[in-house]
Every structure is written in structure tokens, then in C-alpha cells.
Image: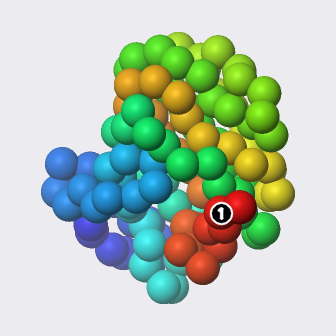
């Protein structure tokens, strides 16, 4: 990631994938000085775990694959080109084999990830 006072640049191929409750993710812009947003490339696994956030809004943008996003128990079909905004407090998970971008506002924090 290149840092400059006026901008940040990230190349997902340069970011190591880490396991998460949804699969494997590459998280960009998690610099402590950045309080605006982060973006992740997520390779969703078949056994993604439902969770919610108290403070963070997420936007899922489907890049590849097909499936559904479960939102408070309702399955919403998704395919490439679909975007879904998930507001704080909404229990959610992806279903199916997909690759997606996840935009987090404010930036992702493990402390804001909750499971029932």
C-alpha cells in the first residue's frame, strides 16, 4: 500500500489473504490514521457465518459467482454487478461461492463484529 498525505493506493494482489468468518479476505486501507472507509476483496466460503455490526455499514458488490445475501433471515439473490448496502444491526451472511468487494464505513474493526 502506498501512502501519501492526499491519497492511499492498495493492490489486492499485494495484500495477504486472512481467514474470516465469511471465507478469506484481503483488507485494504486499515491504516490507523484512516477513519473514512476500508475495502476488502472477499472470497466467500460455503459456510459463511451470520453476524452483524453495531457501528459499521457495509456495501457488498458481487464480482464473480452467484448466490444470495441473507439479511435478517431473508435471502436476496445476487449475481455479478449486484450491490447490497447492509446497515448496522442487520444480521447478514453470504451464501454461495462468490468473490465480492466489501466497502466498510467506517473502516473494518474486529471489535465491531458480533455473533448470536
Give the residue at mark 1.
Answer: 115
Q: Is residue 104 left or right of residue 46?
A: right
The image quarter containing residue 116 is: bottom right
48 to 10, vertically: above or below = above
SS state under label 1: loop
Which x, y percent locates residue 113? 62, 67
Which x, y percent locates residue 16? 20, 60
In percent of the image, x 65 and y 63: which residue is there?
115
| Residue 2 in sight from this viewpoint | yes
85 to 103, vertically: above or below = above
Which x, y percent locates residue 27? 38, 60
Picture colour scheme? rainbow
40 to 106, vertically: above or below = above
| Residue 44 in sight from this viewpoint | no
Q: Quadrant of the N terminus?
A: bottom left
Which x, y percent locates residue 37? 59, 63
Q: Nearer the viewer, residue 46 or 87?
A: 46
Amino acid at each position: 500500500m502506498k501512502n501519501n498525505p492526499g491519497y492511499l493506493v492498495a493492490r489486492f494482489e499485494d495484500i495477504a489473504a486472512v481467514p474470516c468468518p465469511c471465507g478469506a479476505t484481503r483488507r485494504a486501507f486499515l491504516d490507523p490514521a484512516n477513519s473514512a472507509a476500508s475495502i476488502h476483496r472477499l472470497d466467500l466460503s460455503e459456510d459463511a457465518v451470520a453476524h452483524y455490526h453495531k457501528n459499521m455499514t457495509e456495501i457488498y458488490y458481487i464480482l464473480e459467482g452467484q448466490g444470495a445475501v441473507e439479511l435478517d433471515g431473508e435471502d436476496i439473490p445476487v449475481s455479478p454487478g449486484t450491490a447490497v448496502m447492509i446497515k448496522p444491526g442487520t444480521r447478514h451472511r453470504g451464501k454461495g461461492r462468490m468473490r465480492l468487494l466489501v466497502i466498510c464505513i467506517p473502516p473494518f474493526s474486529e471489535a465491531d463484529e458480533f455473533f448470536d
